[in-house]
Amino acid sequence: MKNIWIVILALAIVACQENHDFVTESGIEVSCIVKGDGEVLVKDSVLLLKLQITTADDKILIESTDEPMPLLYNPEMAAGDIQEVLNKMEIGDSVYFETSVENLFTQTYQTAVPDSLNATDKVKVAMRAVDLMSREAFQAYQSEKQMEMMASKTAEESKIIDEYLEAKGIDAQTTESGLRYVITDEGNGTFAESGDKVSVHYAGKILDGAYFDTSMESVAREQGIYNEQRAEQVGYNPFEVVVGQGRVIRGWDEGIPLIPEGGKGTLYIPSALGYGARGSGAVIKPFSILEFDVEVISVEKN
């Protein structure tokens, strides 16, 4: 949901009362299911919030994922009933209340009411203030979570690659980073190093899936990815790149120097060494494992 309100909480707000219930200035009656530890939310802090919004018949409209959503709060921002309720919460508070579809979309999210909903209908809101961080602490938190996610994805993808190789009867070597590779032609034994220019032919596909690029016209035609415009402008020719300079994906910077000049090999590249969570284009989805057949035609030493 775009245009989500920005959340930073005022210092002198009364939190859930001892009976766990409170009423906002506009009259919204809130059930405070769990009382928090009393830590007040402050301006320019990042609130980690668990949120679920459902229709009267329990259809989920908005829901945070397994991880709480980060919200930066401006105490002067008018963002409807949800904002008012947040202004009376403290860390650890869990609350439940109802608001209208119109208030939710036009004031909180500042967008039009969807055609599938009636503006006057009620929606049910459950929120929990999980934690509060400074912006700096939140950046460190994000980095840590990203590293944890990538580590988990790498382990998962390693298993997928190994099962794929085993099913195909392929005996691949594995680098410390998790790259798998097979040398199918030993070439002349000259290996590229960081800073060397290499000329390569390649064909890339999603692991056990569709081809997305190649430098070879015959492969492009065979796999249905031939591009007339490319053929006219630059042609299907060996690709030249200086390795080890970050000009290509990490899987290439690491993998190409493993294949000797005049040799051929296949690289099995986990997403962390490829295009990661962002993907690339229509075929390479986020967290795609890539498979490249590569021929190192020449190595020009730096």
Image (cartoon, rainbow, N blue to C red):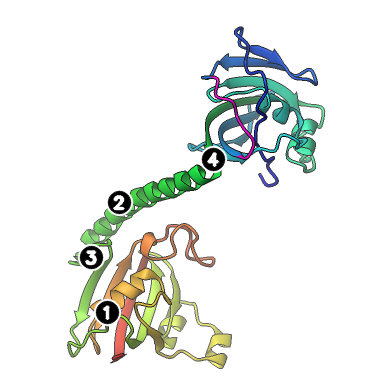
Q: Crowding near pointer 4: few (<14 within 10 Å), some, many (20+)?
A: some
Residue 126 rendering spot, x and y as whole percentages: 61, 25
Question: Which residues make up the magenta segment?
Answer: 38-44
User: Mark 3 sits on what residue?
Assistant: 175
Mark 1 → mark 4, Cα distance in angstroms:
44 Å
Mark in front: 2 vs 4: 4
Q: Secondary structure at mark 4?
A: strand
Q: Amino acid at mark 2?
A: Ala
**Left or right position of 2 against 178:** right
Q: Crowding near pointer 1: few (<14 within 10 Å), some, many (20+)?
A: many
Does the magenta segment cover residue 183?
A: no
Q: Secondary structure at mark 3?
A: loop
Residue 245 rendering spot, x and y as whole percentages: 38, 77
**Left or right position of 171 against 198:** left
Judging depth in this view, the residue of 101 and 192 nearest the camera is 192
Does the magenta segment cover residue 43?
A: yes
Q: In terms of sequence position, does the residue under pointer 3 or pointer 1 come before the other? A: 3
Residue at the spot 74% in from the left edge and 33% down from the top edge:
104
Q: Amino acid at mark 1?
A: Pro
Label pair 1/4, CB-CB below 8 angstroms:
no
